[in-house]
Each structure stands twice: as structure tokens, then as C-alpha cells.
Amino acid sequence: MNLDSIDIKILEILQKDGRASFREIAKELGITTPTVSKKVDTFKKLDLLKGFSANLDAEKLDEITILLYIKCKPTDTRKVLDQLRKTENVRELYGIDGSRIYAKVTITDKLNDFLTGLGEIKEIMDYEYHTITETVKEKPRAILSYNLKLTVPCYYCKKLIKDEPVKIKMDGRNHYLCCNTCVERYEKKYKKLKENIS
Ligand SMILES: [Zn+2]
């Protein structure tokens, strides 16, 4: 699916101000409100637009943030990631390569309590952390530019979805398909697969 210049402009506006109304966006870009609404709907369907959240300044709340590097065995990485994902203090979490994990952690109370908790995850071989003393720049990770392509392949035929995707929810997860024919076939295939497993 190609993102056209209107798509990009809408995303730029929303990335700057998540509270911009569809009407304001439409007016600014000289398009209709339903067009904006339809496009935003597609962005949401594709999980490109993950939500509208307020960006609070942690330092103003007297919270400290640490950068945390963790080493573990490649076979344990998934387990450690899953544990950390459930931890409220962990705000950003990345698998770097097979055996390294990087996280941004906000400490609201005692750093030692958090580190003790970390020590209880026995799969963690080693870790080091650094306290952020200055946040110089903090921007959303996606950089918008023109000629961006949304690379979402159809879950059934694997071709890149050109038009608006058809989204179906199965077992709580979103699945994207290019057309209703693929939806039908995919659902059949998925059902069979599940039957075989059980
Ligand atoms: Zn398809």
C-alpha cells in the first residue's frame, strides 16, 4: 500500500498533535472530513497509527530513567523479554541481537527495588545500566517522508496489499488480507491449521 502525500500530511499533523480534529486536518489540507476519517481508520487498521497518547515529561514528575543493557543466553532471550514486557517500569524494550536486550526504564520509587527484581530473573547473565541525566532530544521513532510504502503483505497470498486492507481478528490478533477472496481462503486454512494442532 502506497502512502500518498495526503496520507503523509495527515500523519505529520497527528504526530505533532494527536488531538487535532479530523475537521481541522481536513480544513488545513483542503480535503473533506470523511476523507480524513477514512484514511485515519486505515492507519489504525494497519496498526501504523498505534494510538493517541499524551507525552508527559517524566523529569517533571521527579522520575528517573535508566538505560539498561542485559545479556542472556540466546535461548533465554524470549523468556527475559516476556518478563520485562510485563514490568510496568520498563517503558521501551528492544531485542538487539540474539542475546542482548536494551530497555528504557522509568524508576518511580527506589532504583534498588527494581534492580533486586531484575536479579530475580535467573536467565539474566549480566546487566549494566546508566542513569539519564539529560534528555536532549526525544522524538517519535517513525520519520515521515514522501514515497513511503506501507509494507503489509496479505496473510494469505503474501502479495503486498495495494488498496485498503481487510482486517480480521482471530484469537485476539489482527490479520490483514488484500481482498475478501483471500479472507475466505485464509479463514478456512486457519481453521484447518487449528484443528490439526488440537
Ligand atoms: Zn491476498
Image (cartoon, grey):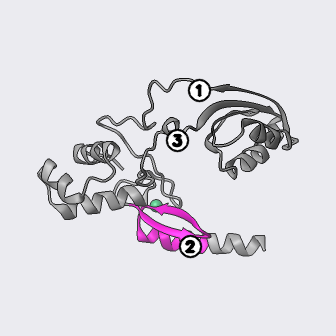
Q: Secondary structure at mark 2?
A: helix
Of the image marks 3 and 2, the number of the one nearer the N terminus: 3
Q: Position of residue 50 (x, y in %)?
A: 45, 53
Mark 1 or mark 2: whose residue is earlier in sequence: 1
The residue located at (43%, 56%) in the rendering is 46
Q: Which residue is mark 3?
A: 61
Q: Is residue 23 left or right of residue 136?
A: left
Residue hosting label 1 = 132
Q: Residue furthest right?
A: 122
Residue appearing at x 59%, y 74% in the figure: 188
Q: CA distance from mark 3 to mark 2?
A: 48 Å
Q: Nearer the viewer, residue 26 or 139?
A: 139
Q: Is residue 33 left or right of residue 15?
A: left
SS of the residue under disc 1 = loop
Q: Look at the image and tell me in which quarter the C terminus lies.
A: bottom right
Range of the magenta residues? Answer: 165-189
